[in-house]
Image: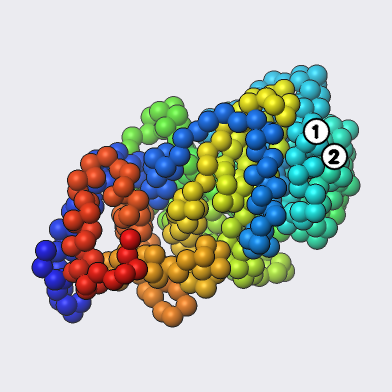
Amino acid sequence: MQRVLDASKARSPELDAFKRRWAELLVRSKLNIRDDLRVLNVLWDKFHIEKAAAAEELAPLWRETFGSPKASRLRHVLYLNVPFCAQKCSFCKFQVRIGASRADVARYVDDTILEMKFFSKFLSGVRFNMFQVGGGTPSLLSPEEMERLFGAAVRLYDIDADVFRSIEFHPASTTKEKLLAAKKMGFNRVSFGVQSLSPRILARVNRGDQTEAHVRSAVRAAHAAGFAQVAVELITGLCGDSPSIFIDSVRRLIQEKPTSLSINQLNLTEDYMRAEGIRPTNYQRYRGMIAHICDRLRREAPRLGYFLKDASPVCGIWNLVREDQPRPDASRQEQQPLYCTLGLGQPSWSRITGKAWYQRTKSDFSPQGRIYMMRRLAPAMEIAEYLHNRLINGSRIQFQPFTVAFGTDFRERYELEIALLKRFGKIRADTEGISFLPTDFTERFFYGSMFFIQQWMKTTAGGELLTPEVIDGLRRDILGPRRSGWN
């Protein structure tokens, strides 16, 4: 392979050849580009094998993690799952239980408290920076059930008093008494999953039990109960939706002065696409609609008294935040890019940084019961996960926090990838970090996947496209003679 042409040249046959190889590799790998930069998921499946595990096997991993020097650099999240729903929305990809009796709920509460008590013995002294309750529909619990379940979590775990404590409510099952019970348990944020205000769209996604009157009443009751943050969640891209319908929902919701509106881009699951007759060829039109809505929100937010945070058609989650709320400070997250999540209740998932990811898949807790499915977390996988999230969210990758978190220099680890992407004009680098420049969805997927050259070479079927000889040729052409830092 000849040396790559000077950067001033408009075209480089060698780089064009590499891009063709890379495109062919992605096609051979059958990646579903509808789901954004899902290179990570493919690598995850290649690197890890799931196996059944018991709580008594997982507990020592928690003890090892929190006993290490790395613990002070982690964010600690406590997540409690309430899996019950009155009915399942057609777009929902989560495991939920429909039509549970009060006896079913009581058994679930008892079982989850047993799990809490067991793991709390191994997490003594750990201060959690976030407490979140989701589902499912936590607001289907009675005030008494809330007090019993959430109260146990508050008593058994050390949760900082002034941190983010959030609970999800469905507007149709919200009552003043339930809101006050949640407030009594220390929750300072309530989030209402509204999804849309269009009766036609709600009926289409099997959510016809919710009305606009329910939503307005729930938001007003939450304000009256004294929650510091009252959030409303919408989904953009539902079938039957349009930019005008969606923006109209936003305007009407803002009349109730929520502190924020979280806008989630619809995740086009195979089941939802099949049910709605969506063809893959429709996807570019769908992406165009999402981008148009984002542009409209960016223009209208100041007139509505809100500012738009994380606004990007690539990001997938945007937030309209009321102007009187503090501006977001990402410095803490930047300095603590890694987190541990302790998930409680079936089917919650947990993540032990540097050790394992696991999900509870069965009921009837006992320390010896193999009721979890676990995957070991390799250091390379953690780095890939972090990088994947930064690329999706359009965030800068800062060199110093990366080194602190992972004990390796980003520039050395990704020297080839950085050099390639600089040649393609897809990143901007300075002494402190890099910014990933593509905004088009397909471009982000294609060029973002290049950060995983080494993993692809080792794990993907059809790896003859990126043999060690090909990679060595790229190194010589882009970087010059091999240096001792390569392995």
Q: From the viewer's side, name the closer residue of 90 and 49.
A: 49
Q: Quadrant of residue 358?
A: top right
- Of the two numbered discs 1 and 2 on the same chain, state the one appearing first in sequence: 1
Q: Secondary structure at mark 1?
A: helix
Q: Secondary structure at mark 2?
A: helix
Do tag 1 and tag 2 residues touch (Cβ < 8 Å)?
yes
- Residue 112 at x, y percent in the picture: 76, 32
Please tell me which residue is depicted at 49% across the width and 43% down the height of the picture: 266
Dot 1 amino acid type: Ile
**Residue 152 numbered tag:** 2
- Residue 383 at x, y percent in the picture: 47, 56
Q: Residues within 10 Å of mark 2 (few under 14, many from 20)?
A: some
- Would you say residue 414 is visible in this rendering? yes
Q: From the viewer's side, name the closer residue of 128 and 38.
A: 128
Dot 2 amino acid type: Ala
Please tell me which residue is depicted at 70% across the width and 69% down the height of the picture: 326
Q: Which part of the image, by quadrant, shows the C terminus?
A: bottom left
State the residue position of label 1. Answer: 113
- Residue 37 at x, y percent in the picture: 40, 50
**In the rendered image, the vertical position of residue 295 relative to residue 173, given as above or below:** below
Left or right: residue 241 compared with residue 148:
left
**In the rendered image, the vertical position of residue 239 relative to residue 226, given as above or below:** above
Q: Which part of the image, by quadrant, shows the N terminus?
A: bottom left
Q: Quadrant of residue 410?
A: bottom left
- Residue 433 at x, y percent in the picture: 45, 74
Marks 1 and 2, how far apart at CA:
7 Å
**In the rendered image, the vertical position of residue 206 relative to residue 224, given as above or below:** above
